[in-house]
Image: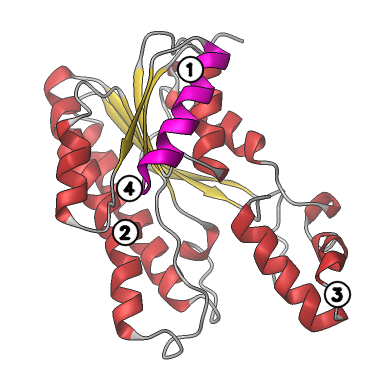
Amino acid sequence: MDLGLRGSTALVTGASRGIGFAIAEALAQEGCNLVMAARHDVSAREAAEDIAERFHVDARSIGADLSNKAGIERLLENAGGIDILVNNAGAIPVGALGEIPTALAREALELKLFAYMQLAQLIFSGMRSRGRGVILNVIGTAGERPRAGYAVGSMANAALIAMTRALGLQGSACGVRVIGLHPGATRSERKLAQLEQRALVQFGDKSQWPSLAKAYPYGRLAEPAEIGACAAFLCSGMASYINATCLTVDGGATDSMV
């Protein structure tokens, strides 16, 4: 299916690996040109070169630390004319409220919450003037179903959901769509490391992590490509009436919680 994205330009943050890289791949497969941002120049460049070679699109890389103003300014200086923004950078430490030092919580919120907000705000302005554009915020199910052991992440995700809906309502008057995407447990370096640690504690052997993955819907983790495909659809004209809402892609895990 042709999603009609050929020739569009997408800025994807956190694009060098995991879900961000999978979203960049899915967009490139549809002929979308890319600006791929990641914290480290080398990883961003290698990811962009890989995608450009395989999909024959223009893929530029920008190394930028989005947890500070200078990094955001550097990114925006090198990323003009954006049709699609995919906010994906940032991981918040696991822990109950009080277990995470305040300084660490602030640092995580700067990247996951405030960087999303600032990028969306600044790029929305250009999209509004052109009368078109899509902002996709990769958030997480904890914003809808807070978890005691992921307190700061639950808070940040809830705020991002509210921002997505508020900005989407604003965008409906000027041709801009703003959508949230909640990936469930997805195969990534970070998730595998978490499962290995749990397996080490529970079984004394980190290689037993697949036994823990069987507890997820369909007995497995989501694949990054499955999240990427959903993201590409949401960014396309095929989803032109989807706005100011969030799509959960977790195999039904959230609805099965009691």
Which residue bears the numbered disc 1?
A: 52
Magenta span: 38-55
The amino acid sitting under disc 4 is Arg
Residue 136 x/y as whole percent: 39, 38
Residue 233 visible at all: no
Camera-side residue: 64 or 101? 64
State the image quarter where residue 69 is shown. bottom left
Residue at (74% x, 75% y) in the render: 198
Mark toward the start of the polypeptide (4 vs 1) = 1
> Mark 4, mark 1: which one is toward the viewer?
1
Badge 2 crowding class, 10 Å Cα cut-off, few under 14, some 14 to 19, many 20 or more, is: many
Mark toward the start of the polypeptide (2 vs 3) = 2
Which residue bears the numbered disc 4?
A: 165
- What distance separates the C-alpha of mark 4 from that of mark 1? 33 Å
Residue 130 colored magenta? no
In the image: residue 26, left or right of residue 129: right
Residue 48 colored magenta? yes
> Mark 2, mark 4: which one is toward the viewer?
2
The amino acid sitting under disc 2 is Leu
- What distance separates the C-alpha of mark 2 from that of mark 4? 20 Å
Residue 50 visible at all: yes
